[in-house]
Image: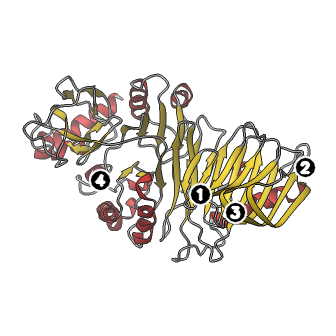
């Protein structure tokens, strides 16, 4: 650490006029920006109790919204002026301009102000995750933007978990961030970014090298905020071992949260080492980790906290959709198509091979099958009894005039529902926007239940996996507010796994065949 500090001191002395202009202490206010113009105008009042961070330490605003922070050197920055000051806004508020400023860009160290507006926030809400665009994002993002915008006001923001560029390759990497910020203007919702290993710029221009281009265009290395009383935090993690400065910042951030507050963490590298970091995940209420890097849609439930990664961005965009409910955070996956065309899937598309992994894994263990064909459904059908907690359901349903149609799994006292409402799939209480894409307008569902986990594929472009209470018991199809028709439905009980067998499906298999991390 002494060597790093000495190096930074030498760098600061050698950076010329720009380094000399970096302030040592920052003063400012966090204020209620009533007219949302991003400026502190006469009559606008400060907001107390809001945290501000330099990426190393935090301070909290006083009764008048003012703060003072003495800057601590962040060893991550070779070019110290690229370090940032950022506001960590609370629930019920949203920034009216950038939530960060680089030291290089501060014109008046006595007035570094952050405006927040009132924002209606409630559960449930949805946010999206995309990752690993590697310069491809701007190419054909119109369709992706149109899809996100069609999801409507339910989507509150988009999280990008890194590798937006091929930074080390030079010229293209240097311009990617600004091109990306222009592309994001097509979206009606804001973007927030966590940095990846390819987002570190090569040596050269000191105002771009290292993390400097990132903080110029996309934000701080570490940030946090609250939404509907859920805490979100992002860190710079793109190596196998978590760096001490990152873990220390994260510990300060987590400790500041009220006891029991739910936390969502975002970073690029999926499963970094570090005993102290792992302890933080276990000791605090981390509901989900959004990560990137492995170019696969994959869910982990056997790490130190539940974790999800997302298939890399393709020309039309693929994204995870997280629905935050009082019961937890439920990840789902939308595929918007491959080969440059919506809903045309390549052989390697997850929507194709995820269900293939499932069927290949369990086909030798099929037990008794019950089949239903062309059955009119108004109310609830006769339950289909099954004698196992591992069940495969494949259904083609015409929703007809029904306002709500779907399946109930388990006992009548505590059923798990998969319901289609015409524009949403509601899976175990998690509502996700869903439109039938097939020309025949049939709802196609493949549902697999095992060991307290339900996996749902719908209409060949939607996948969701959700932990549920053990759902042993009958399967019942239902329709409410009108009649529907079960065109075909099979319910197959799966035999118990053979001893020491690899035949059973495990959710951790999802994503494995895609490719190795880069």
| Distance between the alpha carbons at the discs numbered 1 and 3 | 13 Å
- Could you classify mark 1 by the number of other residues whose Cα lies within 10 Å: few (under 14), some (14-19), or many (20 or more)? some
* Secondary element at tag 3: strand
Q: Disc 4 to disc 2, how far (Cα)?
A: 58 Å
Mark nearer the N terminus (2 vs 1) = 1
Q: Are marks 3 and 4 in contact (CB under 8 Å)?
A: no
Q: CA distance from mark 4 to mark 1?
A: 50 Å
- The residue wearing badge 2 is 495
> Closest to the observer: 384 or 188?
384
From the viewer's perspective, tell me whether residue 348 is left or right of residue 217.
right
In this figure, which residue is indicated by the disc labeled 4? Answer: 209
Mark 1 highlights which residue? 421
Quarter assignment of residue 93: top left
Task: Determine whether 208 is above or below 41 in the image.
Answer: below
SS state under label 2: loop
Q: Residues within 10 Å of mark 3 (few under 14, many from 20)?
A: some
Residue 267 locus on image (x, y percent): 46, 44
Residue at 52% x, 29% y: name it.
285
First in sequence, mark 4 or 1: give its number: 4
Residue 240 in view, yes or no: no
Residue 483: assigned label = 3
CA gap, disc 3 and disc 4: 63 Å
How far is the residue under mark 2 from the one under mark 3? 34 Å
């Amino acid at each position: 650490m002494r060597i790093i500090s000495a190096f930074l001191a030498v760098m600061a002395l050698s950076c010329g006029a720009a380094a000399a202009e970096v302030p040592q202490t920052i003063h400012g206010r966090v204020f209620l920006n009533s007219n949302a113009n991003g400026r502190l105008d006469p009559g606008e009042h400060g907001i107390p109790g809001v945290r501000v961070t330099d990426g190393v330490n935090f301070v909290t605003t006083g009764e008048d919204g003012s703060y003072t922070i003495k800057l601590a050197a962040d060893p991550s920055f070779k070019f110290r002026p690229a370090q940032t000051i950022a506001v960590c806004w609370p629930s019920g508020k949203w920034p009216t301009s950038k939530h960060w400023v680089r030291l290089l860009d501060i014109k008046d160290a006595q007035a570094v102000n952050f405006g927040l507006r009132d924002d209606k926030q409630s559960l449930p809400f949805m946010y999206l995750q995309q990752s690993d665009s590697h310069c491809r994002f701007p190419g054909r993002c119109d369709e992706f933007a149109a899809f996100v915008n069609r999801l409507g006001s339910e989507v509150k923001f988009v999280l990008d978990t890194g590798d937006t560029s091929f930074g080390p390759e030079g010229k293209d990497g240097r311009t990617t961030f600004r091109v990306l910020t222009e592309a994001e203007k097509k979206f009606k919702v804001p973007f927030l970014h966590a940095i990846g290993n390819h987002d570190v710029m090569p040596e050269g221009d000191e105002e771009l090298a290292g993390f400097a281009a990132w903080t110029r265009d996309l934000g701080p290395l570490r940030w946090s905020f609250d939404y509907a009383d859920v805490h979100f935090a992002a860190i710079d993690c793109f190596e196998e071992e978590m760096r001490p400065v990152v873990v220390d910042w994260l510990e300060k951030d987590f400790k500041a949260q009220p006891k029991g507050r739910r936390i969502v963490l975002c970073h690029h590298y999926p499963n970094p080492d570090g005993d102290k970091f792992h302890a933080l995940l276990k000791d605090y209420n981390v509901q989900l980790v959004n990560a990137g890097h492995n170019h696969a849609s994959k869910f982990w439930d056997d790490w130190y906290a539940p974790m999800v990664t997302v298939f890399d961005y393709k020309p039309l965009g693929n994204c995870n959709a997280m629905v935050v409910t009082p019961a937890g955070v439920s990840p789902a996956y939308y595929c918007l198509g491959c080969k440059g065309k919506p809903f045309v899937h390549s052989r390697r598309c997850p929507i194709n091979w995820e269900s293939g992994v499932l069927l290949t894994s369990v086909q030798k263990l099929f037990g008794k099958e019950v089949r239903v064909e062309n059955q009119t459904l108004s109310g609830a059908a006769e339950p289909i009894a099954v004698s196992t907690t591992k069940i495969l359901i494949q259904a083609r349903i015409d929703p007809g005039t029904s306002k709500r149609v779907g399946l109930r799994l388990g006992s009548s006292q505590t059923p798990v529902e998969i319901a289609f409402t015409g524009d949403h799939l509601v899976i175990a209480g998690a509502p996700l926007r869903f439109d039938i894409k097939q020309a025949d307008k049939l709802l196609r569902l493949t549902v697999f239940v095992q060991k307290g986990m339900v996996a749902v594929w719908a209409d060949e472009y939607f996948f969701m996996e959700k932990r549920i209470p053990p759902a042993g018991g009958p399967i019942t199809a239902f329709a409410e507010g009108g009649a529907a028709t079960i065109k075909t439905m099979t319910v197959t009980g799966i035999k118990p796994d053979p001893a020491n067998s690899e035949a059973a499906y495990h959710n951790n298999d999802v994503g494995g065949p895609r490719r190795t991390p880069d």
